[in-house]
Amino acid sequence: MPTGSNSKKKYTYIWVSAIILIFGTFAVYEIVMRLEKGTVVENDRMSEKSDDKVKSVNTIPSKDSTKSIVGFIVSQGEKRKVPDFEFYNQDSVLISNKDYLGKVYVVEFFFTTCPTICPIMTKNLVELQETFKDSEDFGVASFTINPRYDTPTVLTAYANKYGITDKDWHLMTGDKDKIYELAQQGFYIFANEDQEAPGGFEHSGMFALVDKNGYIRSREDEFGNPLIYYRGTITEEQGVNSDGETQQISILKEDIKKLLAE
């Protein structure tokens, strides 16, 4: 028969377990609601000030990457699709979302004078370019968030500087409001003009992955939750950043291969 002290401990453990269960259930509900509303990354942004502070929902990769699922991003009951866009690339050619149909491609928002995260992002994208150089169905869509400065001529110089050679890697410029609308409302990727930020802009260092039919896709973690985006500011060589976050270029490569095979 338990003593009074043991009985008291027993009921204390029961209350603690109940509290954990209640708060755990609430946290799951919040995540689901944010995904349904399409606001999962409104406050999960990274700026050039914070050096890779983005927190996305469940960034734990599957233990067995060969069995991981590259699922769809569902918002308000519908699979999220890349909205229509039309901008000029580094060759002054008008490029739209229709030019990417039939291709698996990675999306980023950057600017050429970025002094912090953009060079790392570009390096990672060049790594993807080299990995899939023999695939005609792979591409990259880079949208400048400083179109006033990043003209086609400037974008061409940037492409030459970093060894961008893939004919399906378009560095695009155009109307600033439309680019920001595409970033924030089309992809839910943060971008903002901020004179106090390094280079005058702050933005997310995340990559979005799009399939051949124009749907935004994402790996699901071991719990069946989407990563949403892939970290673009940590190289495979670096492995882990100062915050203990791991690189996701390796799993992005794996997921691109899976989508190319669909």
Image: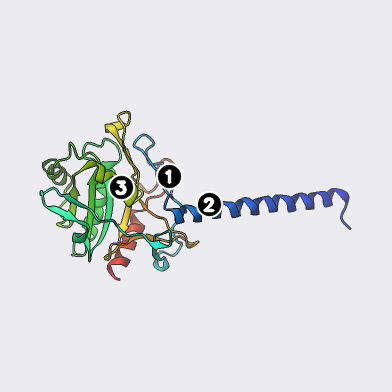
Residue with the most extreme top position? 196
Mark 3 and mark 1 lie on one chain; the one further toward the N terminus is 1
Mark 1 and mark 2 lie on one chain; the one further toward the N terminus is 2
Residue 163 sits above or below residue 136 on the image:
above
Q: What amino acid type should be assigned to the residue bearing mark 3? A: Ala
> Judging from the image, what secondary structure is the residue with disc 2 in?
helix
The residue lying toward the viewer, choosing from 179 and 168, is 179
Residue 237 in view here: no
Neighbour class for label 2 at 10 Å: few (<14), some, many (≥20)? few
Q: Distance between the residues labelled 1 and 2?
A: 14 Å
- Across and down, in percent, residue 225 comes to 47, 59
- Across and down, in percent, residue 54 comes to 41, 44
Mark 1 or 2, which is nearer the eye? 2
> Judging from the image, what secondary structure is the residue with disc 3 in?
helix
Residue 218 picture quarter: bottom left
Residue indicated by mark 3: 183
Residue indicated by mark 2: 30
